[in-house]
Amino acid sequence: MVRFRSVTKTYGDAAPAVRDLNLDIGAGSITVFVGPSGCGKTTSLRMINRMVEPTSGTIEVDGRDISTVKAAQLRRSMGYVMQSSGLLPHRTVLDNVATVPRLNGTPRREARRRAAELLDVVGLASALGERYPAQLSGGQQQRVGVARALAADPPVLLMDEPFSAVDPVVRAELQEELLRLQKELAKTIVFVTHDIDEATILGDKVAVFATGGRLAQYAAPEEILRAPVDEFVAGFVGRDRGFRHLSFQDGTAVPLHPVQLIAADRLPDPAATVDGGWALCVDSDGAPLGWVPADRRAEITGTADLVPGGSLYPQGTSLRRALDAALSSPAGLGVAVDADGRAAGVVKAGEILALIEAARLQRAGS
């Protein structure tokens, strides 16, 4: 879908911002450009829609040399999401989302109807459509930015560090939302980030750029974590790349163990008298709220007294999620949840580590 051939970008007499880039980006996939500041990843992204013109080389989109397409026409054919959302402050959310369809000649009523549909697609309440950007949270603004980029149903979506300005909790939610949208829409997405964790979570393939505008490695995230091509990539990925690699190891074999549950509306629970151990407090839907230590059960009279439970392990996902849940839990037991968010049992770090070791031995012997 997107092809770079010997693309170089220089500014004056300075060293190239991008040096001899050759890259093929597959249709319907998420490709992440990652690297340190000044490595050329954003410049490479912006050359795709001619916000930056290459000094030499060619870029093709769907087999067509983009230099033969008028820049304004090319940009309207692609979605673009930037770090600060870039919403027009004097326009409502609906009119912001409708901007590109209106530029393409879509009647205002039809463009606003499509905008209202997209608010639902990106997880925003329809009532927000008449608000202005300043009345939204940072995460909501970014969702509006994604909706605006999708409004003209573009085949290509360019995303320039779109989640870096929000807090970690919102950022994780937006990452999950993007993956959900991609399953439904199958766009060709080029995503820029400086965060290797974000790159490996989102990318079908990851392009690691080195200082000086050089493409150091282009591969699936699992391969980059397992076998970095040189010292630069190994250093950029970090010393804990082995832990990150666990994200690609299946966790369906992790054993689940029962745990005593206490309903939040029954605190303190006189029936919870087992010797030793911890009990898990859940709400009326069975979702975990926190832990009740054995030696403090009489003291915990409400949910405000609970011991925070650490991260959760969505049942059947990766070994990384399972191990993180177990290690972050004050009880030493990771809470597994089902698809509806209900507590399904607990996992133990020792058993997860045994599975990790077995997988390592299997790889070594193959």
Image (cartoon, helix red, strand yellow):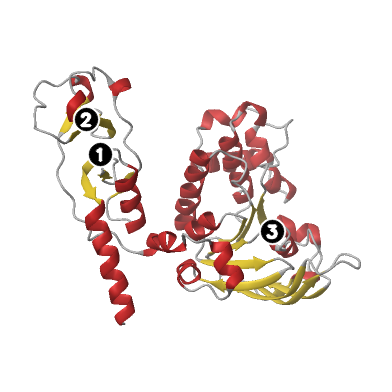
Type of amino acid under label 1: Ala
Report the Cα–Cα distance between label 3 and label 2: 57 Å
Query: Would you identify the image quadrant in which residue 289 lies?
Result: top left
For the C terminus, the image quarter is: bottom left
Among the 4 quarters of the image, the one containing residue 286: top left
Residue visible at 21% across and 24% down in the picture: 296
Instruction: Report helix, strand or loop for mark 3.
Output: loop
Q: Is residue 306 above or below residue 66?
A: above
Q: Nearer the viewer, mark 1 or mark 3?
A: 1
| Left or right of residue 234: residue 93 | right
- Cα separation, mark 1 vs mark 3, equals 53 Å
Note whether residue 340 is visible. yes
Dividing the picture into quarters, in which one does residue 15 lie?
A: bottom right
Q: Which residue is mark 1?
A: 331
Image quarter of the N terminus: bottom right
Asked whether the beta carbons under mark 1 and mark 2 sit within 8 Å of each other, the answer is yes
Q: Residue pushed farthest right?
A: 12
Of 62 and 36, the residue lying toward us: 36
Is 215 placed left or right of 297 in the picture? right
Q: Is residue 6 left or right of residue 124?
A: right
What is the x, y in percent for residue 141?
61, 37
Residue position for label 3? 77
When the figure is inspected, residue 264 is found, relative to residue 65, above or below; the finding is above
Alpha-carbon neighbours of circle 1 within 10 Å: few (<14), some, or many (≥20)? many
Ranked by sequence position, the earlier of labels 3 and 2 is: 3
Label 2 crowd bin: few (<14), some (14–19), many (20+), radius 10 Å:
some
SS label for mark 1: loop
245 over 322 or under it: above or below: below
Q: Where residue 2 appears, x then y in whole percent?
A: 64, 70
